[in-house]
Amino acid sequence: MPNIRPSRAEDGPRVVEIWRLAVDATHDFLSPADRAAIEDDVRGFLPAAPLWLAVDDNDFALGFMLLDGAKMEALFIDPSHHGRGIGRALVAHALALHPMLETDVNEQNTQAVRFYERMGFTETGRSLLDGQGRAYPLIHLRCIFEPQ
C-alpha cells in the first residue's frame, strides 16, 4: 500500500508529469487543441494546489488527488502503476476525511467510470459540458462511506 501525504512545493514537476502521463493514457477523446489548453491551465495551478499524494517507500509520487472539501476535483495515477491499489488508497483516504464524497468523471473516460463504479460511487446526474464549457460530458458521482 502506498503512503498518503500532503504535497509540497518540490512535488510540482512530478505532479504535472503524472497528470500528463495519465491523460495521455486515458483521455484519447480530447482534441489536440483542448488537450494543449488544459495542460497550460494545469501547469499554471496544479503545482501550487493542496494535493494528497500517494508515494512509495522512497517518497516517489505514484498518484495524486485534489480535494475541495468533500468534492474530489482530481484523481490521477501514473499509468505504470495502474491496477496496484493507488487510486483505491487515495479514495479511501478521502472517504476517511469526508464520509460522503462527490466527484465528476468524463463520460468518455471509460476506465475511470469503471473504477469509480467498483469503488461504490453511484451516478447522481450528468452534464453535457465539462467545467470549462467544453463538449466533454461529465457524470456526477457520489460515494457514501458505510463502515462494515
Image (spheres, helix red, strand yellow):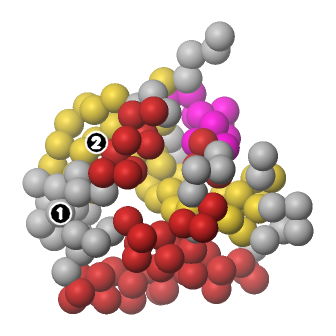
State which region is magenta: 89-100
Q: Which residue is drawn at 81% across and 61% down?
A: 56
Label 1 element class: loop
Residue 143 appears anywhere in the view: no
Does 56 sit left or right of 125 as displayed?
Answer: right
**Quarter holding the C terminus?**
top right
CA separation, marks 1 and 2? Answer: 13 Å
Q: In this view, does 55 lie above or below 99?
A: below
Q: In this view, does 147 lie above or below 12?
A: above
Residue 119 appears anywhere in the view: yes
Q: Tell me which secondary structure the magenta stretch mostly adopts.
A: helix
Task: Read off the residue under disc 2.
Answer: 140
- Answer with the quarter of the image where residue 9 lies: bottom right
The amino acid type of the residue labelled 2 equals His
Q: Rate crowding at label 1 as few (under 14), some (14 to 19) or many (20 or more) other CA atoms within 10 Å.
A: some
Does 51 sit left or right of 130 as displayed?
Answer: right
Does 25 sit left or right of 14 as displayed?
Answer: left
How far across and down, in percent of the image, does residue 111 sit? 37, 51
How far across and down, in percent of the image, does residue 112 sit? 39, 50
Is 73 part of what is drawn in magenta?
A: no
Q: Is residue 55 above or below residue 49?
A: above
Q: Rate crowding at label 2 as few (under 14), some (14 to 19) or many (20 or more) other CA atoms within 10 Å.
A: some
Task: Read off the residue under disc 1.
Answer: 136
Is 91 part of what is drawn in magenta?
A: yes
- Answer with the quarter of the image where residue 47 lies: bottom right
Q: Residue at x 28, y 32 (%)?
A: 123
The amino acid type of the residue labelled 1 equals Tyr
How far across and down, in percent of the image, does residue 100 sit? 49, 29
Label 2 element class: strand
Q: Which residue is drawn at 23% across and 74% down?
A: 30
Q: Which residue is drawn at 78% across and 71% down?
A: 60
